[in-house]
Image (spheres, rainbow, N blue to C red):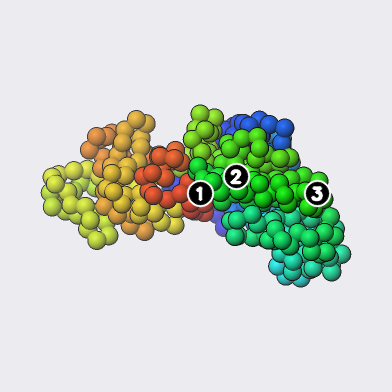
Amino acid sequence: MAKQPSPSLRLWIDSNALAHNWRALDQLSGTANAGAAVKADCYGLGVDRCVPAMRDAGAETFFIAHWNEVEAVAAHVSPQAIAVLHGPSTDDDVRFALEVGAIPVINSLSQAHRWHEAGGELCHLMVDTGINRLGISPYEISDPSIQSLKVDCLMSHLACADEENAMNVRQLAEFRTIISAKSHQRASLANSAGIALGGDYHFNLTRPGLSLYGGIARPELAETIQQVAYPEAAIIQTRQLKAGESVGYNAQFTAPGEMRVGVVSIGYADGFLRSWNAQSDGHLLHGESLLPLLGKVSMDMVVVDLTSRPDLGEGDWLAIPYSLPDAAQQTTLSQYELLTVLGQRFGFL
Ligand SMILES: *Cc1c(COP(=O)(O)O)cnc(C)c1O
């Protein structure tokens, strides 16, 4: 095939900001080391761009969810540095773990049995302290299949670390009981938000994800964490609307008078969901100029008002306002969703 022309969508990943965020979260973790959650292709921002930046900044433990995420991460770090959060659900998972050397997180008695039966040795162990997601229950810690595991990282996960909630203290107390009941090399409780809860939550290893990529998991992090992802889309056509003409699916916007608009190359498949304009005050940016979104996102395109910028036209690039706390407020999506929905069609700057 001929060389592809450059796409009309692009994503700039500020790898200096990413490295800064990892270092900042590592420092905030005090005597604990920060690892890095790199699942879901580094929350949508790309393993090949993000993992080397964090590795070079000093990260040594990398968390993914699925076994099919190992390969991409192992291209940049040793397989033993990779923890697979979903653990071995099938014999095939176990075979793969042993062949490749990535370390499973054991989440249930059946996973523990499966790991033992295959002769698995070093693993991590997840204990559920109240989120009721993955993990053995606290009373299962005394089970022989758990006691006989050789555990590197003994961990649990906070449900409400991003808010003031009595559950944080309850989970902390439960976790303390658990770590005294099972031998391990490292203990780990805090995600990004948990890091900001303070030293009691840090133990030996923290597991930031969201805030590495620019998410403000708690207000305490707002001053420290820098934006990492900067999506942009090109204007691919301009049109002159007459009064009464409408724009996009369901003709939701009607031009009050003659106006010049730009058709911009970004849509649902790129993670630009209709919620961006649900309150009809969404906009894209060119420098300091706010260009209002008109009507609904319509598949691969959205239309903006170019009235304030007659100088802009086909081929000009517009920025999606992706400061995550603000974008979350605008769209009612979570900061996690805003990152992970970014699609596969972006070129990278
Ligand atoms: C995703 C994940 C993290 C990272 O959480 P953030 O809230 O993104 O910082 C940490 N630990 C576990 C077990 C996870 O699944």
Q: Secondary structure at mark 2?
A: helix
Q: Is residue 225 above or below residue 250?
A: above
Q: Is residue 297 visible?
A: yes
Task: Tell me, yes or no, whether the two marked residues, 3 and 2, touch with CB atoms within 8 Å.
Answer: no
Q: Is residue 236 above or below residue 222?
A: below
Task: Look at 14% across and 44% down and name the residue there.
Answer: 258
Which amino acid, mark 1? Tyr
Task: Look at 44% across and 53% down and name the residue there.
Answer: 271
- Of discs 1 and 2, which sits in the foreground? 2
Which amino acid, mark 3? His
Q: Which residue is mark 3?
A: 184
For the residue carrying disc 3, how many other residues have a C-alpha within 10 Å: few (<14), some (14-19), or many (20+)?
A: some
Task: Tell me, yes or no, whether the two marked residues, 1 and 2, touch with CB atoms within 8 Å.
Answer: no
Q: Nearer the viewer, residue 231 or 204?
A: 204
For the residues labelled 1 and 2, the Cα–Cα distance comes to 24 Å
Which amino acid, mark 2? Val
What mark, if any, has residue 169 been given in the picture?
Answer: 2
User: Label 2 CB, ligand 1: below 8 Å?
Assistant: no
| 346 with respect to 151 (left or right) | left
Question: Mark 1 or 3 closer to N-term?
Answer: 3
Position of residue 136 measured from the top left corner of the image (x, y, whole percent): 70, 61
Q: Secondary structure at mark 3?
A: loop
Task: Tell me, yes or no, whether the two marked residues, 1 and 3, touch with CB atoms within 8 Å.
Answer: no
Question: Mark 3 or 2 closer to N-term?
Answer: 2
Q: Is residue 342 above or below residue 49?
A: below
For the residue carrying disc 2, how many other residues have a C-alpha within 10 Å: few (<14), some (14-19), or many (20+)?
A: some
Position of residue 174 measured from the top left corner of the image (x, y, whole percent): 67, 50
Task: Look at 61% across and 35% down and name the residue there.
Answer: 198
For the residues labelled 1 and 3, the Cα–Cα distance comes to 31 Å
Q: Which residue is mark 1?
A: 336
For the residue carrying disc 1, how many other residues have a C-alpha within 10 Å: few (<14), some (14-19), or many (20+)?
A: some
User: Label 1 CB, ligand 1: below 8 Å?
Assistant: yes
